[in-house]
Image (cartoon, helix red, strand yellow):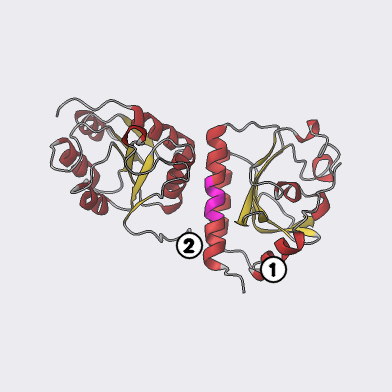
Amino acid sequence: MNAATDPLPAVAAAPPPASAAPHGARAARRPVLLLIESNFMLRRTVALTAQDLDVSEIHEATSIEAAARLLATEPCDAILIALDDGNAGIELIEQVRNGTTACAPGVPVAVMADSYDQARMQVLLGLCIARALLKPTKIKSIVQTVAFLSRATPAPAH
Amino acid sequence: MLAAPIPANDAQRLQLLHDLLILDTAPEDRFDKIVFFAMEEFEVPIATISLVDEDRQWFKAKSGLSACQTARDISFCGHAIHTPEVLLVEDALLDARFATNPLVTGDPYVRFYAGAPLLMAPGLAIGTLCLIDVRPRLLDEVDLAILRSLRDLVVAEISAGNKPR
């Protein structure tokens, strides 16, 4: 493995910690959060830390395209998505809100981006985004956002 | 000052470290990136990946520190390799083990230290990923979890790139 490159497949689920409940123990099921972030070290550190703190089970996607393929069949309880160049991230959130993925349309969603102009903020507000983080940001802030999303109530019907 | 104690299994630990063929190798981007990442996340002036050899600690990656190694007996990391948990020294001047340590009373004037042991096998820590500050600091549970996560990345890098011979 090399921290400079990304050894993971485009999507990956973090292995459960030793203390995790066995399959079938639905009452103890931790919320599943899909983290979509291309930066390996940032994404992996957030996933490991959330797992360490037993905040959430993190499924990782290295790109919007990989996340879209995953969401076509796999539901999740929350989504944290890095909005890189282009509108692909916004379009994916629109698909979620329109109910064309395996997720509940109101699933809590937070975003991370290098900047937000007024037009983009209006779009995000219209998509009922729960949090918007400005990059660069601390891992701690992202982990706190993961914890918030794991407890958040679903967004109203779109 | 309490000199860094020698673990009972030190010969086995040193054999593992030497078999990795990582000591005295050139800096590598994959380790430097983790150290820089840790410095930025925790806003500390010094972070290192320190490997505890027989008589020295040697820095595979470092930032904010000019020395490439120090004596093992005065090293904080020599203490940190004794347990699987993070060794947290919030204020070295208030800790009898370190208050008169030359790394505390002189350059680099360590006041805060947090070292996550690099456990390559149960009971065998070859060194630490550590954070150092020149002022007292506190870390909360989230901070400690982040440090452990970055440590896990270091261990994964060593495991992937330095198979014991």
| Magenta stretch encompasses residue B152 | yes
Mark closer to the observer (2, 1): 1
- Of residue A85 and residue B148, the one placed in the foreground of this image is B148
Crowd rating for badge 1 (residues with CA inside 10 Å; few <14, some 14–19, many 20+) = some
Question: Where are the magenta residues, as a range?
Answer: B149-154
Q: Secondary structure at mark 1?
A: helix
Whether residue B37 is visible to the viewer of this picture, yes or no, is no
Q: Is residue B80 above or below residue A123?
A: below
Kind of residue at disc 2 = Asn
User: In which quadrant of the rendered image does the C terminus of chain A lie?
Assistant: top left
Q: Secondary structure at mark 2?
A: loop
Q: Is residue A153 above or below residue B57?
A: above
Residue occupied by mark 1: B18
Residue occupied by mark 2: A2
Q: Quadrant of residue A26?
A: top left
| Residue at (24% x, 35% y) in the render | A120
Left-right relation of B2 to B39: right
| Magenta stretch encompasses residue B150 | yes
Kind of residue at disc 1 = His
| Residue at (71% x, 61% y) in the render | B13
Dominant secondary structure of the magenta stretch? helix
- Of residue A75 and residue A21, the one placed in the foreground of this image is A21
Q: Determine the CA span between mark 2 and mark 1.
A: 21 Å
- Of residue A2 and residue B62, the one placed in the foreground of this image is A2
Whether residue B101 is visible to the viewer of this picture, yes or no, is yes
| Residue at (57% x, 64% y) in the render | B28
